Image (cartoon, rainbow, N blue to C red):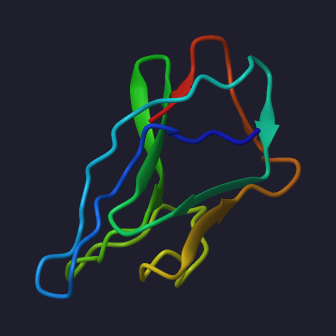
Amino acid sequence: MTALNATAFVAAGSAAAPGMQTVIGSCTPPTGSSFFYVTAYGPAEVVSLVSGGKSTEILDARPLAAGQSYPPNQQTGTGTSTRDLAFAEFSAPNFLTVSQGDIFT
């Protein structure tokens, strides 16, 4: 499954004033889907799974403050720059399986 926000547009910028945009959205995966990788690209990306009303962070590509750590399934050192794809891995038999009504945010 691939999801993207087709309305995302970052205006041109310069070194002194880089173009920026905040994009907020969600994705509803098909019930029963199992994922072995979840990825995100870009600085300040956070991906969470909301299941049963509880939000669980899966990926966090923001710079970490002292004492913080990445989510447990995120691969160490991924998502640390604007050129680096952040990814979380879910190995068998512990795939990330979604239930009815779950959403990625």
Residue that protrudes farthest toward the left in the picture: 16
Q: Quadrant of residue 95?
A: top right
For this view, does 48 lie left or right of residue 39? left
The residue shown at (38%, 50%) is: 9
Q: Nearer the viewer, residue 85 or 66?
A: 85
Residue 61 relative to residue 36: left or right: left
**Residue 89 spot, x, y in % from top left:** 71, 61
Q: Quadrant of residue 2 in the image?
A: top right
Where's the N terminus, which quadrant? top right
Residue 14 in percent (x, y) is at 21, 81
Measuring from the top left, give residue 78's x and y in whole percent: 54, 78
Number of numbered tags placed on the structure image: 0
Query: In front here: 29 or 10?
Result: 10
In the rendered view, would you say 33 is above or below 48? above
Task: Tell me the residue at 80%/36% (across/down).
Answer: 34
Quick one: quadrant of the C terminus?
Answer: top left
35 to 38, vertically: above or below:
above
Q: Measured from the top left, where is residue 38 in percent x and y?
A: 66, 53
The furthest residue to the top: 100
Vertical relation: 27 (above or below) 19: above
Residue ID at (44%, 37%): 7
65 vs 88, left or right, is: left
Instruction: Indicate left or right for 28 with 70 as reference.
Output: right
- Judged from this view, the residue extending furthest toward the right is 92
- The residue located at (46%, 42%) in the rendering is 48
Task: Tell me: residue 87, above or below residue 105.
Answer: below
